[in-house]
Amino acid sequence: MKILVTGGAGFIGSNFIYHMLREHPEDTIVCADKLTYAGNAETLGNAAKHPSFTFYRADISVSRAVEEIFSREKPDAVVNFAAESHVDRSIAHPSVFLKTNVLGVQTLLDACRRHGVARFHQVSTDEVYGDLPIGRRDLFFTEDTPLKASSPYSASKASADLLAGAYFRTYGVPVTISRCSNNYGPYHFPEKLIPLAITNILRGKPVPVYGTGENVRDWLYVEDHCAAIDAILRRGVPGRVYNVGGHNERSNLQVVRAVISLLGKGEIEFVCDRAGHDLRYAIDPSRMERELGWKGSVPFEEGLSRTVEWFLANRQWWEHILDGSYRKYNREFYGANS
Ligand SMILES: NC(=O)c1ccc[n+]([C@@H]2O[C@H](COP(=O)([O-])OP(=O)(O)OC[C@H]3O[C@@H](n4cnc5c(N)ncnc54)[C@H](O)[C@@H]3O)[C@@H](O)[C@H]2O)c1
């Protein structure tokens, strides 16, 4: 199978590429990524040495660029990770979120339709469901929970999900959608909570925590997410949505305190709360478990410890992001187009 992975130079996409190269050496991986501030060519350094891996620098919202890749590579399946993914940035600058996360998905769906691609998988998020009350630990998001986005980011992801569903129903494009909870692990961009906490503490800076830190997220180690998408790609049913989560609910404060405890040092700085801040996310992943035999396998404490070890062992990777030198590497290595 030849799989086009869009957004593969980001956090989850790169982990997925390494998962696929390791687990399915018979498959061929084509990666297309715009290399925005969140895309890092250094992350794909080892994949680039692999004979079954090809990279294109391309914007998923530019139909000519997308068409060129589809015509040349003729992928059997597309897995779309490409997105603007940071909620705070969406509050400051919504329009690029609509361009990439909605129009980009439409462009990919149109290309899949034209080329008769056997599967389009849209990587979505639990944030499309809005939030749940903190005090109701009995409530979870199921695939039938109505969409109720809170931020421009989650609104753009919800729009993409609706579009993908419409292309399945109207044109018969074989679409699957996964809605996953918060991920963490290697190659996580240091603007997000866990890598921000680790890298701030290692540089002697306090860790900013929104409000009182009571907001709850349901954490999943990134490798478990990659295995879930792999299972959906192989055994999932077109037209179906799959919730992905591991029942690892923690408040932001608990998460930061756990990082401080693993590193043996660190200060917390409470900062003004995020506008529209969702209170609690909690996924019911029973469809994945029942229908596809997938189950999250990494307990939060173990995954967090592995993540901290990874950031300690790969200091150069995140220092290149923080000092901006990774952008120079992106330009030099993947220059204009390939
Ligand atoms: N991080 C999470 O906790 C989480 C949880 C659930 C779902 N998701 C979803 O998973 C996907 C990947 O998330 P992530 O955390 O790896 O994001 P990320 O920000 O780390 O990576 C996004 C990648 O997309 C690329 N990209 C952005 N705009 C593009 C465009 N127009 N054309 C081509 N490439 C473009 C970037 O260069 C980057 O490599 C996103 O769709 C996100 O909504 C993320």
Image (cartoon, rainbow, N blue to C red):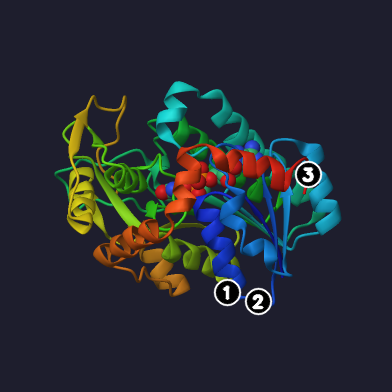
301 to the left or right of 18: left
Task: Determine the image quadrant of residue 221.
Answer: bottom left
**Residue at label 1?**
22
Question: Closest to the observer: 46 or 12?
Answer: 46
- Disc 3 or 2, which lies upstream in sequence? 2
**Label pair 1/3, CB-CB below 8 angstroms:** no
Q: Please, is residue 75 above or below residue 282 in the view?
A: below
Local packing at callout 3 (Cα closer than 10 Å; few below 14, some 14-19, many 20+) is few
Residue beneath the point at 28% across and 60% down: 247
- Residue type highlighted by circle 3: Asn
Residue beneath the point at 36% across and 61% down: 285
**Label pair 1/2, CB-CB below 8 angstroms:** yes
List x then y, in percent, for residue 165: 58, 47
List x then y, in percent, for residue 233: 59, 66
Local packing at callout 1 (Cα closer than 10 Å; few below 14, some 14-19, many 20+) is few
Gap in Å between the C-alphas at discs 3 and 2? 26 Å
**Residue at label 3?**
337
Q: How many marks?
A: 3
Question: Closest to the observer: 159 or 197?
Answer: 197
**Residue at label 2?**
25
Q: Would you say residue 55 is visible in this rendering?
A: yes
- Residue type highlighted by circle 2: Pro
Helix, strand or loop at mark 1 = helix
- Residue type highlighted by circle 1: Arg
Q: Please, is residue 275 above or below residue 176 in the view?
A: above
